[in-house]
Image (spheres, rainbow, N blue to C red):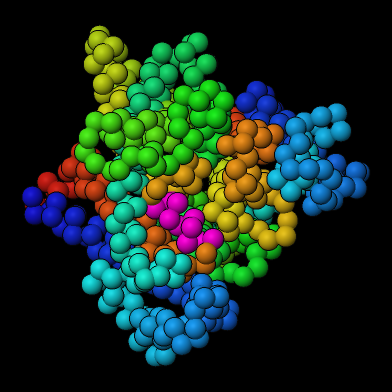
Amino acid sequence: MRKFTRYILQKFSWYLLAFFLALFLNFLLPRLVPGDPISVLVSQMMSGAVTSEAQERVYQSFIQEFGLDKPFFVQFFTYVGNVFKGNLGTSFSLYPLSVNKIMADALPWTLFLQFPAIIVGWIVGNLLGAFAAYRKGNFDRILFPVALFINSVPYYCLAIILLYVFGVYLRWFPIGGGYSRTLLPSWSWPFIVDVLHHYFLPFISIVLVTIGGQAIGMREMAIYELNTDYVTYCKMLGMGDRKIQSYVFRNAMLPQITGLAISLGTMVGGSLITEIVFGYPGIGSTLFNGIRRLDYPLIQGSTLIIALTVLAANFIIDIVYGLIDPRIKAAQVEGS
Amino acid sequence: METLKLLFKSPKFIAGLGIFVFLFLTAFIYPAVVDKNPFEMVGLMYEAPSSRYILGTDNFGRDVFVELIHGMKTSLIIGLFAGVIATAIGVTIGLFAGYKGGTVDNILNSITNIFLVIPPFVILILITVSLRSRSLAVMGLVLGITSWPWTARAVRAQSMSLRGREHVDIARLNGASVVEIIIREIMPYILSYIFMAFVLQVASGILNEAGISMLGLGPSNVVSLGTMLSWALLFESVRSGAWWAFVPPAITIALITFSLYFMNTGMDEIFNPRLRS
């Protein structure tokens, strides 16, 4: 097992490096905005009713929080220090609410929506793809172009169209939000049913697009595997179809797992916009509001949380991959 | 030439190319012939499709059909530009890393891997947030520099497998420089592959443009398919039932990407004989 620990440690250090790069970009880019965004923002959000002294106070508190009166490098270390202390700063637009609090409210919704949807879509897509490659004929001829078309429809377009057809036109589902405004969040049956009712459309829109992409990839891999020598050999040995199918499936699965890791970033990005379409109260909607109000701490907090979640998910996939890929296992045995 | 002839035997490639060329020509010829400003407010908010405005009007009372054609043109330009940039960066890095191997490969491959796991969408958001004005060219550039990593990764693998070929060795013995070898001895063999990657990059450029526009970070002062969707969403066209404001751009985006994916699949089947079922 020592080799495997090393594999994990090695992967971990890469992800740590990627995380620092993300952190640096997160720190640097919004600071390139020309002008002094804080003074503009403070005057914008305080316009009217508030005295200039109060404005000055808010301005100073922001300057202090970000250390903007200090040199660039000190600012960066202040930022990194704050992030590691788990402090994402104070929101501009929802002052004096902390970004931590806003994220803590939004993140569960996003995880609750995206994680199950991506996993379900991935599993169903792979099964369909393998099936299409194996069955060929009419099933494949119909499934393939359909999958290709669904895969070309971006997440948000499918979301908009589903919302219109099933929410606005047929009125089967609510037209947005995470739950009805009339209910108070609690662990009661009516509330859970209401949440699921709101959940269905955004969920299914992510599932459908994921199925499309995964089915195409899996079909391609499975066709490739079906044409390999070992399959011919197995057939000549008179092995049963089911047995061969399971070999093909297992071999074609490996690249699909890497594929999941690579496309995870895209999937999460795409489903963030799904949240906006449905007004779902997750990170996507938070980010959208942050962008509309030029709330930099909120934008930075959201992008950081998204990057962190995707990195964590990729890391987990890498560990799983290490556990099941015979080549990595072989390398472990060889080395020991 | 031979490959081109082969390509035109693939019904998938032909169908994809046909749709794409049709959309492309419409997007470029229509604005040149019919001089209509997509920003002109011609009617009231959300007028239903009629004989006068075949796709109705949007939230600002603008003609959706005119907007759609101009938006298509913008999206295609941004997508093609982003595709060229992403492919150029990805191919250069991939070829060098794969051919050189050793330290150069280690460094380039590490950079690629790091950028593969940081969600490109996040980098895209951070860059566009920090830009005050986003012109067509800037949008294309930003979309291109955030989506090169997977092209680099794929090209690297191809380039690595060609490194040990005899004709490459002969060129090296003849004293050809690294750049010469890469351009003359390696690139021609993966040209079809590069073109396929380019087609996918164009599609992803168009998709990402629309995505980032819906977050409110789209190109400024132009109509694109993404900004049309973003306005439609912002002004509640879905909830007020004005389907003509969001269905046309949504379908157009899907159609463009579909045609590109279809072309790609057709090419894949031709260049990759093992995939022919």
Q: Which residues are magenta?
A: A283-292
The image position of residue A331, as x and y in percent, is 18, 48
The vertical placement of B2 against A310, above or below, is: above
Q: Residue at x 27, y 64 (%)?
A: A16
Q: Is residue A309 magenta?
A: no
Measuring 62% from the left and 46% from the top, which residue is drawn there? B235
- Main SS category, magenta section: helix
- Residue B32's place in the image compared with B19, above or below, is below
Count of marks placed on residues: 0
Q: Residue at x 43, y 55 (%)?
A: A286
Of residues B241 and A75, the one drawn nearer to the viewer in this rendering: B241
Residue B11 point in image, percent of width and height: 65, 23
Q: Is residue B215 rendered to the left or right of residue B237? A: left
Confirm whether the magenta stretch covers residue A286.
yes
The vertical placement of B9 against A42, above or below, is above
Q: Quadrant of residue A98?
A: bottom left
Q: Residue at x 39, y 22 (%)?
A: A128
Residue B88 visible, this angle: no
Front residue of this view, candidates B99 and B254: B254
**Residue A66: x %, y % from top left:** 38, 81
Q: Is residue A99 visible?
A: yes
Residue at the far front: name it: A49
- The one nearer the camera, B226 or B45, is B45
